[in-house]
C-alpha cells in the first residue's frame, strides 16, 4: 500500500476589486445573470459567466422546474451555451456568484460536483485549463487555476 497526498491550491481575494479588471467585469456579468435566475422553488439564485478567447462573454443561471430534477445549475447552463454556440472557442475563465432570498450568502459558493464534471469535460476538450472564480452575493472570492484542481481523480474520457 502506498499513500498519496492530493494537494490543491486556492487563492482567496477579499472582494472583487482585488481581481484583474477583466475578471471584475466577468464577475459583474455573473451578478447580472444571477439576478435573472429562475429559482422560484429554492430561492437560491446562481449566475455564471464565461469568457472565451474571442473576448465573447457567455452567461447562464439556474433554471428550476416544478419537476425538480429537470432543472439545471447556472454553471452547466452557461458552459453548455458556450459549447453550443461557440464550439471552437477556448473558454478561459468562469465567474460564479450566488445569492438567496432566504438568507445572506456571505461565503463563496463552489460549483456542485455535477457542474465540476461538466466543466472538466471542456478543459479536456480544449486541452487548456479554465480558471474558476466563485463568490457569494459579494465579498470574498476564491480562485482556482483549473477546474481539475477541485475535482481530483476525475472521471474522464480516457476510461471509455
Ligand atoms: N445550483 C447552481 O446553480 N449551481 C451549483 O453549483 C449548485 C446549485 C442551483 C440549483 C438549484 O436551482 C439551486 O441552486 C439550489 O440547489
Image (cartoon, grey):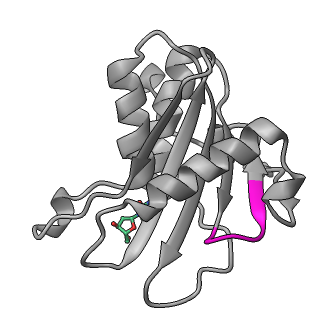
Residue 92 image position (x, y, % from top left)? 65, 27
Quadrant for residue 78, please give it: top left
Q: Is residue 85 magenta?
A: no
Residue 20 image position (x, y, % from top left)? 85, 41
- Farthest residue to the bottom: give it: 103
* Relative vertical location of residue 88 with respect to residue 130 in this rendering, above or below: above
Q: Is residue 93 left or right of residue 145?
A: left
Magenta stretch, main secondary structure class: loop
- The residue sitting at 42% across, 17% down in the picture is 86
| Nearer to us in this view, 159 or 46 | 46
Residue 145 image position (x, y, % from top left)? 76, 39
Residue stretch in magenta: 136-142
- The residue sitting at 79% across, 50% down in the picture is 8
Asked whether residue 151 is in view, the answer is no
Quarter holding ligand 1: bottom left
Residue 87 image position (x, y, % from top left)? 40, 14
Q: Is residue 16 left or right of residue 123?
A: right
- Farthest residue to the top: give it: 88
* Relative vertical location of residue 106 with respect to residue 146 in this rendering, above or below: below
Amino acid at each position: 500500500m502506498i499513500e498519496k497526498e492530493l494537494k490543491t491550491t486556492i487563492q482567496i481575494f477579499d472582494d472583487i476589486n482585488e481581481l484583474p479588471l477583466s475578471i471584475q467585469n466577468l464577475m459583474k456579468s455573473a451578478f447580472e445573470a444571477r439576478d435573472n435566475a429562475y429559482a422560484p422553488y429554492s430561492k437560491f439564485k446562481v449566475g455564471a459567466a464565461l469568457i472565451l478567447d474571442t473576448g465573447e462573454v457567455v452567461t447562464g443561471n439556474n433554471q428550476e422546474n416544478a419537476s425538480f430534477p429537470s432543472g439545471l445549475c447556472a454553471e452547466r447552463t452557461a458552459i453548455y451555451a458556450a459549447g453550443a454556440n461557440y464550439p471552437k472557442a477556448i473558454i478561459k475563465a468562469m465567474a460564479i456568484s450566488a445569492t438567496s432570498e432566504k438568507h445572506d450568502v456571505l461565503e463563496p459558493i463552489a460549483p456542485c460536483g455535477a457542474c465540476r464534471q461538466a466543466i472538466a469535460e471542456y478543459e479536456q476538450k480544449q486541452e487548456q485549463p479554465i480558471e474558476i472564480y466563485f463568490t457569494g452575493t459579494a465579498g470574498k472570492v476564491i480562485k482556482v487555476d483549473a477546474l481539475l484542481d477541485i475535482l481530483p481523480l476525475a472521471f474522464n474520457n480516457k476510461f471509455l
